[in-house]
Structures are given as structure tokens and as C-alpha cells.
Image (cartoon, rainbow, N blue to C red):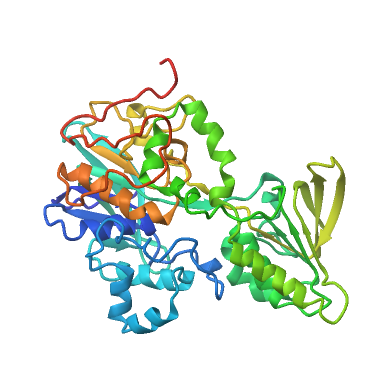
Amino acid sequence: MSPAPHEPTTIRDLVGIGIGPFNLSLAALAHPLIELDTVFYDQRPAFHWHPGLLVDGATLQVPFLADLVTLADPTSPWTFLNYLRSRERLFPFYFAEHFHIQRAEYDAYCRWVSENLPALKFGHRVDAVRWNTDRALFEVDCTQLDTNGEATAALRTHTKNVVLGIGTAPYIPDPLKPLVDGPGAPVIHAADYLQHRDRLLTAGHITVVGSGQSGAEVFLDLLKHRPHGHEGLHWLARTEAFAPMEYSKLGLEHFTPDYTHYFHALPEPVRDRLVPAQWQLHRGIDTHTIAAIHDELYRRTLHGGWPDAVLTPGVNVRTAGRIAITKIELHLEHIQQGTRSRLATDAVVLATGYRERPLDHLLAGLDPHLHRDSSGRPGIDDHHRLHLDPAVTGTVYVQNAELHTHGVGTPDLGLAAWRSATILNTLTDKEPYPLPQRTAFTTFGLQQQKPRIPSTRQAPVLTPLVDGT
């Protein structure tokens, strides 16, 4: 029988679940608000941001101003520039003239913040969230873990509010799920690329599946480390082309609060049609990466011949299987031609992206109180709060789990500080972080959507989740 959880007497104002960049942003902006008692839990032993993809030279796709706090409070001690100052690196950064920093540097910056915020509790796995009607508080049950991930103690925290920031998980297409982590020829997700790169480079032939930024970076890194004339690489993509990310200045205004408010006010069916159609806004490839791939391929033609590298867009992987344990066989279909073929390869890297981690397990205790849309997804208001019954007087906020309600800016680092400030302004019923009333030159729709600043003393306004209901 499990031991009874230890219950601290302190009632928290906010408990954060997960410490990725978004909840780290919230913790950093909450830190100077002395009226708030907050704690953030994460089961990992320390902060790490996509360690398997910190390839040398890979950069963020947003400017360094999209750090954890600057776009809400440029005077915060937790800015990227203050991080550089603490490391005596401001002048080198100034002369480097890098508007887009390397991913490894962003990871180091976030780790610096995480190591200096007292409200963060790593090595704590949250198991359940419930509403205690008698106490009018949320109960958050978690397990304290040692450095080996073994349980050492049970803990129950009572809080007035909760924020979920559990992030995303690597997505593996169904045809390839049985092959991952199997014996023999490796099939790995790009999230684990660096941990397996040495093994991959010994393979005679490698296939990369996926046309986004991660797929491009993995293909380029492999290409650079393969011998001339014997590259043995194949890059497959479902998209019709290895397309660049939309990076025009007006196009980037889809990642502003103005567009987020506009998108949230659209009918649910319209939102569901828009998200997949806007893939090039956030799933395309950085033009510099495309250029670097072409330059590397071209360089390998200088002495005659073509590199042994095949790039094929418009291809769907129908099924896959193992040939003995030495090879993987991919069954391919060309979407436009309607033709099919087979590809035998010695290793596969799945740059197939990420999906939101499901909230159902954590929210099982709140399910009777949760309002859902016509597709069964949690309803989320324009201030990132779950739609809950009025009987639940506390609030559950979500971060990076509202793509269906807030659009393509949901996972974008550039909106992290704004969303955190929005949550804290609503939570405190004040405005510790004044936010701009307008953020884009584009007017989305015939009527500009204006943010509402509701009081936390009132239940969130429940907008219809389905047309006509």
C-alpha cells in the first residue's frame, strides 16, 4: 500500500505542472510578484530543451528578443541579455550581430534561469489533479523522485489555481511505431538524433522522413559527415516540396496577439480547417538551412558526378517492416503520381514532428467539470483558461495545449512572454504587466478582435463551443 501523501500546510496561489520554456517563462515573470505563492513541478532532474536536436550551428527560428520575458518586461532580470551580462559575453554578442541565436545557447540560457528560480521543483512527477469541493481548492498529487527516477515520497499540494505546461511528445506515424526501438537496424525519432548519430553514421544507407526544420537539419548534418560519392542518403517528405517557412514581415504577424484573438473568435469548424492549411507558417524550413543543403550538395559536384543523395517530396510511407534485422523496408506511395515502390534502408530518422501531450490522464479528476468542444477537446477561453463548471471556483490555465483554440502561435516561443503576462494579469486581477492593445499592422477580419480583461473573481465567460449551440 502506498504511503499517505505528505500535505504541506501552505496553500499555493498557483501550481505549475511541467517546466518547459512556457512554464519557465511564467515562473520568471511571477518571481517578482511577491503577492503570489507559486511552485512548479517537473519529473525530470533538470531543465533540458530538445537535447537530441542541439546540432552544431542550428539556430532558433525566432529572434533572441523572443526569450522568456523580454516581450512582456524588458527590464526583467531574466532576459537573455542579462544572461549574457552575467557571463561577461555582452560585447562578443554585440559584435557577432546574431539576431537568431543557436539552439544550444537558448538551452543554456533557459537552464541558467531554471537554476536560479526558487519556485521550481525538479524531480517531482505530478500524478493527479482534483477539485476539493469542501475546501474550494485543487489537490495536486505528486511523487518525489531520486536521481534514478525512483519514487521516494508522496506529496499533496493544495492550490487555488493550476497551470498545465506539459508540452509535446515526439510523434511517430502508425506504420513505423512497431519498428521503433526494435533490434537491428535503428529507427529513431529526430528528438533522439544526437544520442544515436555515431551509430547512424556507420549505416550504409540512411533515410530521413519529414520535411520540416528538424528533418532538414538532420539531413544536412548527416550529409556533412558522409563521404563524397558514398553519401547513401534519402530524404522523404509528404509535402509537395521542401518548402521554406513563411518569413515575410507581414506573414509573421500571424504570430501576434492580434491574430491569436482573431483566431480564437472564429467558429470551431473554421479553426479546424485553418490549422492544417497554415503548415508553412510554422512547419516549413528556414531558408538559410535550405541554402546550406543546396550548397553542400553542389559542392559535392565540383569534381564531376552527383552525390548519392535522393530528395523526394510528395511521398507517403504506407507501411514498413524489417528484412531480417539488418534492413528496414519502407513501402512508399507518391501522392500525385499514384505510384508505389519499396525502399530498403539501413537506418531511419523520423523527423515527423510533435503532438500535444494528452491532458486526459492529469485531468481525469476534473473531467466531470470540464466543458469540451464537438470533437471532445477541452474548451479554452481567450485567456488560456479551461472551461469549467461554475462550481469550480479555481482556474486551470494551459500552455501549448490550445492549438485548436488559439492557432499556429500556440507553440511559438515568440508568444511565450505575452501569454505568461496574460495569465498573470488575469490571475492577480491586476495588471502587473501592461500589454499592448495592438500588435500587428494587419487587421484580421472586418472587425479587430480586442482582448478582454475579466476579473478572476468572476467565472470565465463561456463562449459557444459549437455554432448554434
The extreme top residue here reads 468
Q: Is residue 147 visible?
A: yes
Q: Residue 352, image x and y in percent?
A: 63, 53
- Is 436 drawn above or below residue 205 in the view shown? above
Q: Residue 430 vs residue 262: left or right?
A: left
Q: Residue 465 vs residue 186: left or right?
A: left
Task: Tell me which corner region of the image, top left, top right, bottom left or bottom right, holds residue 388.
Answer: top left
Task: Tell me which corner region of the image, top left, top right, bottom left or bottom right, holds residue 450.
Answer: top left
Q: Residue 138, image x and y in percent?
A: 24, 40
Q: Is residue 189 visible?
A: no
Q: Nearer the viewer, residue 225 or 454?
A: 454
Q: Nearer the viewer, residue 52 or 418?
A: 418
Residue shown at 33%/77% (left/top)?
Answer: 84
Q: Residue 272, image x and y in percent?
A: 53, 32
Quarter of the image that includes the C terminus:
top left
How many marks the image carries: the answer is 0
Q: Nearer the viewer, residue 428 or 176?
A: 428
- Is 352 drawn above or below residue 128 in the view shown? below
- Is 416 drawn above or below residue 445 in the view shown? below
Residue shown at 41%/56% (left/top)?
Answer: 413
Q: Residue 402, image x and y in percent?
A: 42, 41
Residue shown at 72%/47% (left/top)?
Answer: 240
Q: Nearer the viewer, residue 148 or 174?
A: 174
The extreme front residue here reads 441
